[in-house]
Image (spheres, coloured by chain):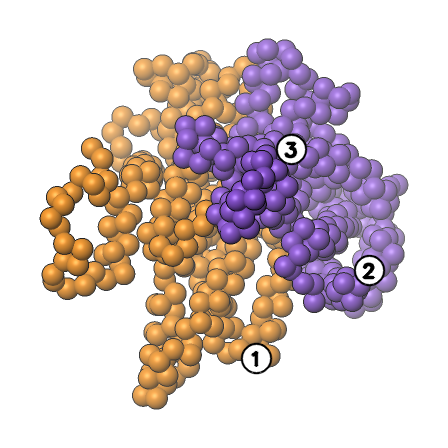
Chain colours: A orange, B purple
Amino acid sequence: MSALPLTRPAVEPETAPGPPASLWSDAWRRLERNRVAVAAAFFLAFVSLLALLAPWLPGLADPAAQDLRLGATWPSAAHWFGTDELGRDAFARVVYGGRISLLVGLVGTLVSLVIGVSWGAVAGYAGGKLDELMMRVVDVLYALPNIFLVILLLVFFSRSLLMLFVALGLVQWLTMARIVRGQVLSLKHQTFVEAARALGATDRSIIFRHIVPNTLGPVIVYTTLTVPAVILQEAFLSFLGLGVQPPAASWGTLVSDGARVLALFPWLVLFPGLALSLTLLAFNFLGDGLRDALDPQDRRESA
Amino acid sequence: MTSFVLRRLLLFVPTLWVIATLTFFLVRLAPGGPFNAERDIPKAAREQLMRQYGLDRPLGEQYVTFLAHAVKLDFGPSYKFPTRQVREIIAEGFRVSAELGGWALLVAVLLGVPIGVIAALRQNSALDAAAMAAALAGVSVPNFVLGPLLVLVFSLTLYWLPPALWQGPESRVLPVLTLATAYVAYVARLTRAGMLEVLRQDFIRTARAKGLPERRVVFQHALKLGVLPVVSYLGPAAAGLIMGSLVVEQIFAVPGLGRYLVNGAFNRDYTLVMGVVLFYAGFLMALNLLVDLAYAWLDPRVELR
């Protein structure tokens, strides 16, 4: 089925009667028509559900249950993704790995979202010296590749999951702060803000009640693109052995473990690698789709 | 122009100072010292070690000493390998890492730009779609997944290339390819977008109207502006390549700076980690300055102020 406008009845008038479409319903329509983005959304929903429901899925093996006599076996009907050297079911390991990878991605993104939006909104609204100072901080942090900061934080403090959330969130907010600041600068002199101020609203409520909600479009788009970035960084750190610590295992840990026995059991790299790559790809497709839907003016392809 | 360069160079100082301070205090305030890992170390010996590295001094004094030496790129001896100076390790590791990163950047530009130009010239053709789909896949497969897969195919199945180590030209192929692939893809996408933007503009229509052959329109007029997004991407790309080199050097056992950094991080080798981080920060800032200059040179509309 093609969803091209051509297949619609030609009589449909250009300006349909009824209430005008809001930004959101308009964006939703555009997103729905983007089949790649819809497919990506369905894929992500499927992966998330699988990860969320893993402990209650009937027939899913215990990812920690070892069977040393079985050892590593090729993928089969009993073990879809094969088993590892300890006889653990690789499919279950990948599903449970997804739990950790997605959790780190979401929490890290949330941390960066809170810091980035607040920082950018305050800087943009305050203007002047404070704005200059706050943005200079962002510039300085930009100069340092953020992975170094993460490594420093993880090495010199504890390597706990909590520290991982904090460290990944702490380095991801810079671009978000810049985006929000730019939005706020263009919004703060508009009449609805003047009106709110005339009615006696405090700075705090003007920023968070009136201005921030109007920056949602770009923020949503960038958030969707931050999740895969955080997931990738976590996997990267876990690959180096600095991320999630055993017995917990993320997709990055699984790839790292698999890479060690690559010559003998290649499927142990292949499946977690595939799960990770497809998830990242789906997030990027969805993010691109959302950008096109929410910001129809900006049609430039930014890779 | 000269004043632009001078002012940017002057900005280096406070930025590096902030990073150095941040790193120093992050390291010093962290729980646990560098000599806590070895359990059986006698108390007297540990005190001797602390004295030797000046760790028994007040924090403020340590900080001043650290800054005074860091200015001279002297980060002292490594904590883990006391006979070696951090400066030597950086010099040795960077030579290898720079070769790896330099080749990767070259491959990214020499493959990515032509792919992007062809895709833009045949916009919406099957070739364009295929190139862009491949580019998207290239961006999405992380290098630490790609590396083992390349080893599996080219070393363990086909026996064409060595799976590890940094000896001889053929040992360079897989690490460089692993590092470069994502950037080939990214550069191709940027080039395509840039070229499409430029090919729509009036001066291109003028050039065509004058009857210039298409080849000259594309290569002499459009390409120079079309690759501008790629040029401004080179700064972030270098940062990304450095990050990627941490993983690639680990996979292929390449004795580069990234490997020293990761091992230093595991060993809590304070001086080594601080030295490498500061070195890379300064290196990237210098590189970004060069990128800005190249940008201004390519695009006469940009004025450096």
| Residue nearer the viewer, B158 or B256 | B158
User: Which comes sooner in the sequence, label 3 or label 2?
Assistant: 2
Whole-angstrom CA distance, mark 2 to mark 1, is 35 Å
Residue type highlighted by circle 3: Leu
| Residue nearer the viewer, B15 or B69 | B15
Taking the image as shown, residue B168 lies to the left or right of residue A115, namely: right
Looking at the image, residue A298 lies above or below residue A182: above
Neighbor class of circle 2 (other Cα within 10 Å; few <14, some 14-19, many 20+) is some
Can you give x and y, in whole percent of width and height, for residue A10 in the image? 14, 45
In which quadrant of the rendered view does residue B161 lie? top right
Same chain, labels 3 and 2? yes
Q: Which residue is mark 3?
A: B110
Camera sees residue A245:
no
Q: Where, quadrant-wise, is the N terminus of chain A in this rendering?
A: top left
| Residue nearer the viewer, B69 or B209 | B209
Q: Which residue is mark 2?
A: B66
